[in-house]
Amino acid sequence: MKNNGFGIVQLLITIVILGMIGMAAYKSYFLSGQKSIEESGKIYDSVEQPAAQKTGNKAESVHTRKAKELEGRVFINSVVTAERTYEAVNGHFVYTGWTSESKELGINARGNEYFKEFSIDKKQDGGFLVKVKGSGELEGVILTSE
């Protein structure tokens, strides 16, 4: 008997085994993730949230809220960086009330979706405190630098 490699029977058995392994992998990878998503949705539905966070009939998820607030954190960082750069060049800080633009710092908040105003206040120790104010869906939210 000569061994010429895989015969038709061995090929069919290999295909069947690989198919079964593939189906098991698919179920364990995709369906367990879907179940986790459904369970986390149930958790968020049961958490009571303020009326400002409601969107339609379903409460806004914590992750969605944090993603929206990330815009504010990035905006604060850009204002802080611009303020420190301005102080390094000019020797003093710029302080301002609530505004959407500072030509001295080169900051313009009109392109932001959720945080369109900022203020820079003087701290007791001589530094500065940056605040950004939410608008639209995040009306009333104020984030501060520390």
Image: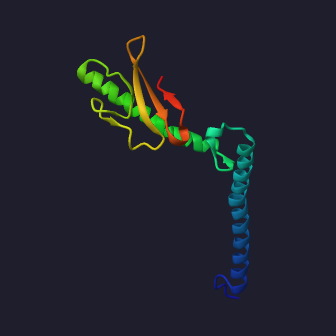
Residue drawn at (74%, 70%), measured in percent from left and top? 20
Residue drawn at (28%, 32%), measured in percent from left and top? 103
- Closer to the camera in the image, 103 or 27: 103
Residue 62 screen position, x and y as percent = 63, 41
Type of colouring: rainbow
- Above or below 26: residue 118: above
Classify residue 35 by image quadrant. Answer: bottom right
- Is 144 displayed left or right of 105 in the figure? right
- Count the marks: how many? 0
Residue drawn at (69%, 86%), measured in percent from left and top? 8
- Closer to the camera in the image, 68 or 7: 68
Residue 91 screen position, x and y as percent = 26, 18
- Closer to the camera in the image, 98 or 31: 98
- Closer to the camera in the image, 100 or 65: 100
Classify residue 124 by image quadrant. Answer: top left
Residue 143 screen position, x and y as percent = 50, 29
- Above or below 62: residue 22: below
Q: Report the residue that reaches farthest toward the bottom.
A: 1
Residue drawn at (29%, 34%), measured in percent from left and top? 106
Classify residue 74 by image quadrant. Answer: top left
- In the rendered image, the quadrant that contains the N terminus is bottom right
Q: Report the residue that reaches farthest toward the left.
A: 90
Residue 52 screen position, x and y as percent = 61, 39
- Is 137 displayed left or right of 99 in the figure? right
